[in-house]
Image (spheres, helix red, strand yellow):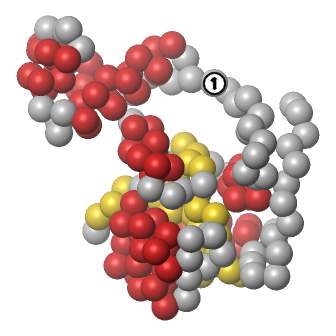
Amino acid sequence: MAEQSLMEIGEDNSLLLVDDDEPFLRRLTKAMEKRGFAPEMAGSVVAGKAIATARPPAYAVIDLRLEDGNGLDVVEVLREKRPDARVVVLTGYGAIATAVAAVKIGATDYLSKPADANDITAALLASPDELPPPPDNPMSADRVRWEHIQRVYELCDRNVSETARRLNMHRRTLQRILAKRSPR
């Protein structure tokens, strides 16, 4: 794998971690402390927005889907308060389209879950002018197709008939695809 040049953490090592998966959040907090960050945890959109407003961090790792709303709301608040913050958005399966939206509103990068602390650190500290290395395990063609269908479905406000029409696909076929789990 090509060596990626990483920026230094810098004097301001403040890091906001927003995720509603408490065990993951605790593990990630410990791992990021070992890497030189000063993490602050938030388990909800409300808590994340409060921290982003009161003490805007230099770095943030924000889960996209939280129990009380969308992590993009935290990204927007952080962008208003601290435009230079480096933000990584974590996404579960089927949320790549929303992750692209996150990058458009100011996230530095996005990673699919499960992401480990090394991947997150590399994304936070990557030089903005360099391309990331190719993935070790790229998505299969079936997974890419499934992600595309999910993206169009989200863009059509989860309207199955409209999504089927835009994909030139029978509605029942689309319903069967949507009912299945995502391919690997």
Q: Is residue 14 visible?
A: yes
Report the residue at 46% width, 21% height from top: 143
Q: Residues within 10 Å of mark 1 (few under 14, many from 20)?
A: few
Which quadrant of the figure has residue 47? bottom left
Query: Circle 1 — which element?
Result: loop
Q: Is residue 118 visible?
A: no
Residue 44 drawn at (x, y percent)? 38, 73
Which quadrant of the figure has residue 48? bottom left
Q: Nearer the viewer, residue 169 or 26?
A: 169
| 122 left or right, relative to 39 | right
Report the residue at 70% width, 59% height from top: 124
Report the residue at 17% width, 39% height from top: 157
Which quadrant of the figure has residue 158? top left
Amino acid on which disc 1 is placed: Pro
Residue placed farthest to the left in the image? 161
Q: Nearer the viewer, residue 173 or 162?
A: 162
Quarter of the image where the N terminus is located: top right
| 167 left or right, relative to 129 | left
Above or below: residue 121 compared with residue 91:
below
* Residue under pointer 1: 138
Above or below: residue 121 compared with residue 147:
below
| 94 left or right, relative to 133 | left
Report the residue at 75% width, 78% height from top: 13
Above or below: residue 107 compared with residue 13:
above
